[in-house]
Amino acid sequence: MKRTVVTAFSLLFGSLFLYSCEKCSDPTITQPTDADVEWLSYHPEDPSPLFENEKDSLVQSFIFEGINVQNVPAEGKSLADDCLDKLDTQVFAKLTDTTNTYPALYTYFLKRPDKTLVRLAVDRRGDWPIDKENPTYANLEVNGFQYQDVFEVTPDSVNRNSVRKILFNKKYGFLLVDYYNGKQLRLYR
């Protein structure tokens, strides 16, 4: 894990050249910490997660596809600015269903100097923030297992293919993804 993250952050420094200009000194980049990276929940060294679907069948087709690291203009800055002297860092981890039965799942964080913003996403369905300091449940049983510090996301869309509810835990990732069309993924352990 550490080697993958170090490699990813090395690529970040290479991207600095894309933002440099004659008028600016080297930009300041907000660097993620190890604690920030834990919010990704999924890493190359981990086995691919297993889920159970709405029919209680085992879904073994999700794989960890990778981590994407990007620098973005700092708060209050824009790509239209003549000079970008401050950059924040955003990092995504992606789980892909190799059968394309279920949309991809993402964990994401944006590292700013004074805070880390965490979001969960379901491909082509939306992305939603979680308040990392305030889990919805201190303890919750999901699919026969007790989890601590569980976050619940209930998107406001009611379209047939939309996400109805997500349960997420920093250590185990997506515990439940429930769709309005009846499809469901529950973490299998």
Image (cartoon, rainbow, N blue to C red):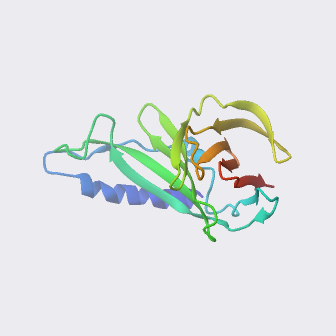
Q: Which quadrant holds the C terminus? A: bottom right
Residue 175 seen from this side = no
Q: Is residue 5 above or below residue 170?
A: below
Quick one: which residue is furthest to the top in this view?
A: 134
Question: How far across and down, in percent of the image, does residue 19 sit?
Answer: 25, 52
Which residue is nearer to you in this view: 18 or 136? Answer: 136
Residue 113 seen from this side = yes
Quick one: which residue is furthest to the right in this view?
A: 144
Quick one: which residue is furthest to the bottom in this view?
A: 99
Question: How far across and down, in percent of the image, does residue 36 sit?
Answer: 54, 42
Q: Quadrant of residue 165?
A: top right
Q: Which quadrant holds the N terminus? A: bottom right
- What count of labels does the image hold? 0
Q: Residue at x 82, y 48 (%)?
A: 143
Question: How far across and down, in percent of the image, does residue 135 sit?
Answer: 66, 31
Q: Quadrant of residue 61?
A: bottom right
Question: How far across and down, in percent of the image, does residue 142 sit?
Answer: 79, 44
Q: Is residue 156 above or below residue 23?
A: above
Which residue is nearer to you in this view: 185 or 41? Answer: 185
Q: Going by the image, does 71 lie left or right of 185?
A: left
Q: Going by the image, does 15 lie left or right of 80?
A: right
Q: Residue at x 26, y 57 (%)?
A: 17
Quick one: which residue is furthest to the left in this view?
A: 23
Q: Is residue 70 above or below residue 153?
A: below
Q: Residue at x 62, y 70 (%)?
A: 98
Q: Going by the image, does 134 lie left or right of 29?
A: right
Q: Residue at x 13, y 50 (%)?
A: 22
